[in-house]
Image (cartoon, rainbow, N blue to C red):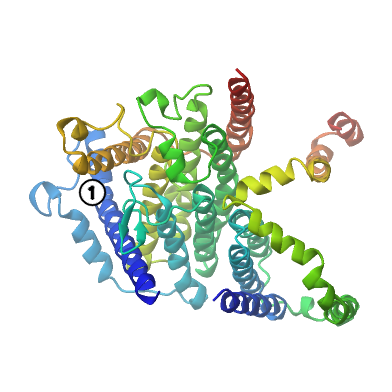
Amino acid sequence: MVTEFGLRLAISLTQIGAVMCIVVITVLILTLAERKVLGWMQDRMGPMEVGPYGILQPFADAIKLFFKEDIVPAGANKFIFTMAPILCLIPTFIGFAVIPWGPNWTFEINGVSIKPFVISDINIGILYVLAFASLAAYGIILGGWASNSKYSLLGGLRSAAQVISYELNVGLAIVGVLILSGSLSLVTITDAQAGWFWHWHIFAMPAPQIFAFVVYVISVVAETNRVPFDLPEAESELVAGFFTEYSGLRFAFFFLAEYANMVLVSCVASALFLGGWHAPYPGTLMELVGLSSWSWIESTMWFAVKTYSLLFLFFWLRATLPRLRYDQLMRFGWKVMLPIALANIVVTAIAVFIYQRI
Amino acid sequence: MSQLFFVYFAGMIIAASVLVVALKNPVYSALSLLVMFFHVAGLFITLHAEFLAAVQIIVYAGAILVLYLFVVMILNVKQDDRYHSQWRIAGFVCVPLLIEVMVLLSGGAETSTTGPRAALASSAKTIAPDNTLAIGQTLFSTYLFPFEVASLVLLVAMIGAIVLAKREIGEQDNPNPMVRTKAAE
């Protein structure tokens, strides 16, 4: 009993550690990739100084932030000021627990069944992600309030309104996928999309979720406070928004949380709409060659390709679009995105109902 | 093991609830309310109601409490003592609640082991691990009418809020606000 529990704990901790490492490495890559991609799109080189071709820039940034002085402004609420970056970071990392990275395999070790590519396959997977994503707003709003600065407070309040408005659209955009797959578990949803790429939920019959996908992507851009929806940190109006007063490691936490959140929403999008770890063709090439025990590499690589393509979309938007005005943001969220998401639910429900009768 | 979890969650719920009303800084009160919501969600998980736990966090912690914090921050109330001298109202609310708890503890204990709670426990065993499916089927078959009524009430409240919010703008730029609100209705 005790050994079984210990084994389970050890396996889970190993998986958590591996996923944390992957996410942090991805964030490091993203910080460099963002500057490089923006540079190329603006016809310049991007960072070139540190290391060959500037590839060591993330480490230089990390070391710089680590050794900066940690300033707590006078009149700030010290307890909440310290807690806010952590409150921002933890919910984002918790969300990765239900993301399926690779094939839905099950191993047996001493009677303990483990799934190597998902930390925990719980039956409310996607709701769990949404629940913790909604908590990330606390870090931002409390950080803005505790800084005792008007810019920070305004940034925090803007962020609260924005996150609540767009979270609703994220939730509604997902409902169509849930109707199609009949499950809330991300593993089951991904398994429902096996086969050719037209089985992915974005193209799947009887109700392609293409509109839901567009609504989802736009809403998560708003929810992660990225350009063109980065009003909580609009530098031309609010200096830096909710983290104006933050410095050093605490600023790094906010930064890490924002990028980890981008990775999380891209993972969820590729699992829900783009077939997750499934290749665009049935099975894997490795199985055809006869190396079926190595096919997980191909599967996880497909997942990575989909996730990184979505992350590239974030950078692309940032390089292309100007920031929205606040009333435009709210009008767009409530009067354009919400009706599209609701209509998608109605159409999908009717289509699935008729499809089942035929 | 589950007893241990229950004691922890119940204790934390009580402690956090007391802190919500006892703390003087409204932001701290909202934060202890957040802690309380989390532990209520934990209680749901010990009862194998994962769907309810997730909805509890999404709705209460993710949406409603953020709005509370929003209002508290806009009002900028800092350690206001006005809201801490309402002993008469508190007593008025507390005494009936206390009597209810007394009645429940004295009379309700013997029936609870055989009454509806026992039936619930036996039905909980038959419910499949997919708790979401069970809730959906019950909600749309047995409790369909109350569910529809509840959504209608919420819709009415939403329309009412929109009408109330609209009227103020209408009064400013429209000389005859009644015409506008009639049209809005």
Give the left or right position of residue A353, taking residue A65 as reference.
right
Query: A314 and A131: which one is in front?
Result: A131
For disc 1, the marked residue is: A32
Name the residue at the left extreme. A52
Q: Measured along the vertical axis of the image, is residue A338 above or below residue A48?
A: above
Q: Label 1 amino acid?
A: Leu
Give the class, few, some or many, for how many residues have Cα within 10 Å of label 1's Cα (few <14, many ≥20). many
Q: Quadrant of the N terminus of chain A?
A: bottom left
Residue at the (22%, 40%) spot, across then down: A295
Residue at the (63%, 21%) spot, across then down: A357
Tell me if residue A151 can be seen: no
The image quadrant of residue B180 is top right
Q: Measured along the vertical axis of the image, is residue B103 above or below residue B143?
A: below
Residue at the (31%, 38%) spot, across then down: A312
Query: Where is residue B15 shown, x and y percent of the image?
Result: 65, 80
Q: Measured along the vertical axis of the image, is residue B181 above or below residue A198?
A: below
Q: Badge 1 sits on which subunit?
A: A
SS type, badge 1: helix
Query: A321 and A217: which one is in front?
Result: A217
Residue at the (54%, 54%) spot, across then down: A131
Query: A63 and A127: which one is in front?
Result: A127
The image quadrant of residue A343 is top right
Tell me if residue A200 can be seen: yes
Query: Where is residue A146 shown, x and y percent of the image?
Result: 52, 69
Give the left or right position of residue A35, taking residue A4 as reference.
left
Query: A291 and B53: which one is in front?
Result: A291
Query: Where is residue B5 shown, x and y percent of the image?
Result: 57, 75
Give the left or right position of residue B113, taking residue A264 as reference.
right
Query: Where is residue B155 shown, x and y percent of the image?
Result: 79, 41
Q: Quadrant of the C terminus of chain A?
A: top right
